[in-house]
Image (tube, rainbow, N blue to C red):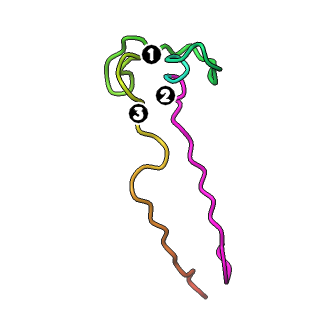
Amino acid sequence: MLGGGENELEVMVVNSWYNRVKGDQLHPDRRQHTKTNIRLVGGKGYRNPGLSSSGLSPSGLLGPVEIVSERPDRE
């Protein structure tokens, strides 16, 4: 609920699970953040392009974000 005067908005953005697993499997020599039986090796398709493909899937806060102020209906 917004109050009169100055307000603060905090937005927490996280990575996708797919990217976290892929990052761990691409760098097994670094600290692992996941413990799973998912293996992203030589896959095909939308969510499993395999480890050899470049880049990670887009994740987090995507696209333009709009903050809209509305007044509640008063009875």
* Three-letter amino acid code at the position of disc 3: Ser
Q: Is residue 3 above or below residue 42?
A: below
Picture residue at 63% right of the left edge, 18% below the top: 35
Label 1 – label 3 distance at C-alpha: 13 Å
Q: Which of these two is toward me, 26 or 16?
A: 26
Name the residue furthest left.
45
Q: Quadrant of the C terminus?
A: bottom right
Q: Is residue 10 above or below residue 19?
A: below
Can residue 55 be found in the magenta stretch?
no
Q: Residues within 10 Å of mark 3 (few under 14, many from 20)?
A: some
Residue 42, image x, y percentages: 37, 11
Q: Which residues are magenta?
A: 1-21
Q: Are the residues flagged by discs 1 and 2 in contact, CB closer than 8 Å?
A: yes
Label 3 – label 2 distance at C-alpha: 8 Å
Which of pointers 1 and 2 lies earlier in the amino acid sequence? 2
Can residue 12 be found in the magenta stretch?
yes
Q: Is residue 37 left or right of residue 41?
A: right
The tag on residue 40 is 1
